[in-house]
Every structure is written in structure tokens, then in C-alpha cells.
Amino acid sequence: MYRCLLAFAAAACLAAPAAAQQRAFAPDALRGALVITSSGEALLNGHPVRLAPGLRIRGQDNMLAMSGSLLGARLLVNYTTDMQGLVNNVWILTPAEAAKQPWPATPQQAQSWRFDPVAQAWSKP
């Protein structure tokens, strides 16, 4: 009986910090509306884009999601691109993350705004 109680208490202590953690987005992550149209292509803010071969999509639970399971879904995301302009990292936003404003949608905005990596928040000058 005591062992079960100790195991439950230990599990609760380990789960509580994990639930309170906030995801860390890359400092160059931009925000956009993403619709995956095929295995290698998508619409980002209504414009066609290519997806990188090593694309990583993280769901709202921060677990990896396969692009095939998201075909046609309109998603509010933070994303990064590689040197060739291919989308290579995607984070599907939770409602709390989506509510964080402002967040840059273009590289020009990201260059002129200031990012606080600890608070995961942007501020305009």
C-alpha cells in the first residue's frame, strides 16, 4: 500500500513540471497559416511553398506529427525555413501560444523586432 502511494506521489511530482513547461521556439521562427497539400508541398499564408525532406512537425503536445496525417488541415503555426527557403521546422500552436502577440510573420518584421528567448515573446521597437 505504501509503495503504491509513494509511486503515485513520485509520478505526480514528475508530471507537474512537465505540464507547466513552455515550448521554446527558434529565434527566427515566423508565424503563419499552413495547409499541407501533398507530401512535399504546402500553402503558407496562401502562397505555395516546398517542404524540406527532413521536415519536423511538432503538434500541440510537442510530439512529432507526420505531414500525411495533416493533409488539407488549416493550421496556425510557427515555422522556420532553411537556406534554400524550404520549410524545415513547424510547431502547431496551442490556443495559449497563438494568443501571444505580437509575433512576426515576415523576415523583415523579425529583423526589426526584439525577441526575448526566456519569455518566448517579441516586442516592437
Image (cartoon, rainbow, N blue to C red):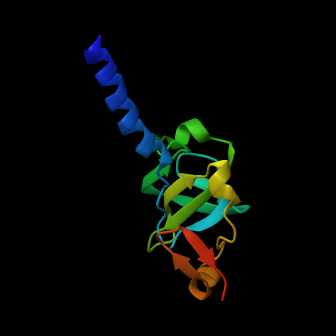
Q: Where is residue 104 in the image (x, y as percent from the top left)?
A: 64, 74
Residue 88 falls left or right of residue 36: left
Above-or-below relation of 102 to 59: below
| Camera-nearest residue between 83 and 28 | 28
| Camera-nearest residue between 62 and 7 | 7
At 51% from the left and 75% from the top, the residue drawn is 116
At 41% from the left and 37% from the top, the residue drawn is 15
Q: Where is residue 95 in the image (x, y as percent from the top left)?
A: 68, 49
Q: Where is residue 88 in the image (x, y as percent from the top left)?
A: 47, 60
At 40% from the left and 32% from the top, the residue drawn is 12
| Camera-nearest residue between 14 and 51 | 14
Residue 70 falls left or right of residue 85: right
Is residue 76 visible to us here?
A: no
Quadrant that contains the N terminus: top left
Q: Position of residue 75 (x, y in %)?
A: 67, 49
Q: Quadrant of residue 16?
A: top left
Is residue 90 visible to us here?
A: yes
| Camera-nearest residue between 5 and 15 | 5
